[in-house]
Image (cartoon, rainbow, N blue to C red):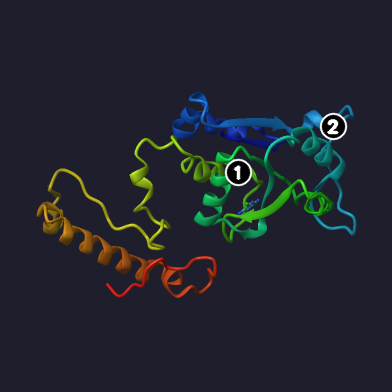
């Protein structure tokens, strides 16, 4: 029982990459249903207007709540086991692997994710206020990080890819999900190597050619801890990312 993902945008073409690679194959294999919808289909004026000037003044335009309300009401599936409205915005809570896992669980249980991709200065605040007050919908405003994109479309692509690869059957060998960065260990992934064993004067670490799986496991663990301490100390101390906690202590 797999659920569905819908994306509302004024640039449906931005979501074309969802036909490629792993997500495209998951759709063709019937593992995931994705609908991309043009927000302007829910306008009623000749110019298909989706925005207007901000009350209170200021630069830029704001997306109209009436158009968004009609579009969301049209796309939300009443008889789905759950409906999650995802609103990409730099003012949202940071996207994490934990949230990707949560969303993948909802979709694999038949739930619906709806992405509301805003442009310009954003969507009239009453839209999230309205749907937050509805008990049939959960609203999550999410940010990819501390920088500004032109709209939510690229963020929706990112979140959909992070979620889709966690759905049962999408990745051929689910073992590959176990040891990756931001996985169960709460560490960055160790460095990986393949043939040839020597390249431009750089040799693959001897331990990886030793066949001693115990030594290989502890070498990889040590490199993962070392890398995480150097590049992302916040993942170890919890500073700045209260949602991430190590599954095991890092004394290795
Ligand atoms: Cl989710 N949306 C936009 N527009 N900008 C962002 C972002 C999202 N995350 C970081 N910057």
| Disc 2 crowd, CA 10 A, few/some/many (<14, 14-19, 20+) | some
Q: In the displayed structure, would residue 74 be above or below residue 227?
A: above
Residue at image x 11%, y 52%?
Answer: 211
Residue 41 location in percent, x, y? 79, 28
Q: Quadrant of residue 69?
A: top right
Instruction: Depth check: give the residue in front, 57 or 141.
Output: 141
Which is nearer the N-term, disc 1 or disc 2?
2
**Residue neighbourhood size for the residue with mark 1, other residues' Cα within 10 Å, grouped as few (<14), some (14–19), many (≥20):** many
Which element is circle 1 on?
A: helix
Query: Foreground: 61 or 21?
Result: 21
Task: Read off the residue under disc 2.
Answer: 43
* Residue 81: image location, x then y, percent: 67, 40
Instruction: Tell me if residue 78 comes above or below residue 212 in the rendering.
Output: above
Q: Name the residue under label 1.
A: 156
Left or right, residue 202 beside residue 245: left
SS state under label 2: loop
Between 209 and 158, the one lying in front of the other is 209
């Amino acid at each position: 029982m797999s659920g569905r993902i819908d994306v509302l945008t004024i640039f449906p073409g931005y979501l074309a990459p969802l036909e490629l690679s792993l997500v495209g194959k998951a759709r063709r294999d019937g593992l995931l249903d994705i609908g991309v919808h043009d927000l302007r289909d829910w306008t009623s004026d000749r110019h298909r207007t989706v925005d207007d000037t901000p009350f209170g003044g200021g630069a830029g335009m704001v997306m109209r709540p009436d158009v968004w309300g009609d579009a969301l009401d049209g796309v939300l599936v009443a008889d789905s086991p759950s409906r999650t409205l995802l609103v990409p915005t730099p003012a949202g809570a940071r996207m994490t692997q934990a949230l990707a896992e949560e969303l993948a669980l909802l979709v694999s249980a038949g739930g619906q994710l709806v992405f509301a991709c805003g442009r310009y200065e954003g969507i009239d605040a009453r839209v999230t206020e309205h749907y937050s007050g509805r008990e049939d919908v959960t609203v999550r405003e999410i940010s990819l990080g501390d920088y500004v994109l032109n709209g939510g479309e690229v963020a929706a692509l990112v979140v959909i890819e992070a979620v889709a690869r966690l759905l049962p059957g999408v990745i051929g060998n689910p073992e590959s999900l176990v040891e990756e960065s931001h996985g169960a260990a709460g560490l960055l992934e160790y460095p990986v190597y393949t043939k040839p064993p020597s390249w431009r004067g750089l040799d693959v670490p001897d331990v990886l050619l030793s066949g001693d799986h115990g030594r290989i496991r502890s070498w990889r663990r040590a490199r993962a801890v070392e890398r995480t301490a150097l590049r992302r100390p916040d993942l170890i101390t919890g500073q700045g990312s209260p949602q991430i906690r190590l599954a095991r202590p890092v004394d290795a």
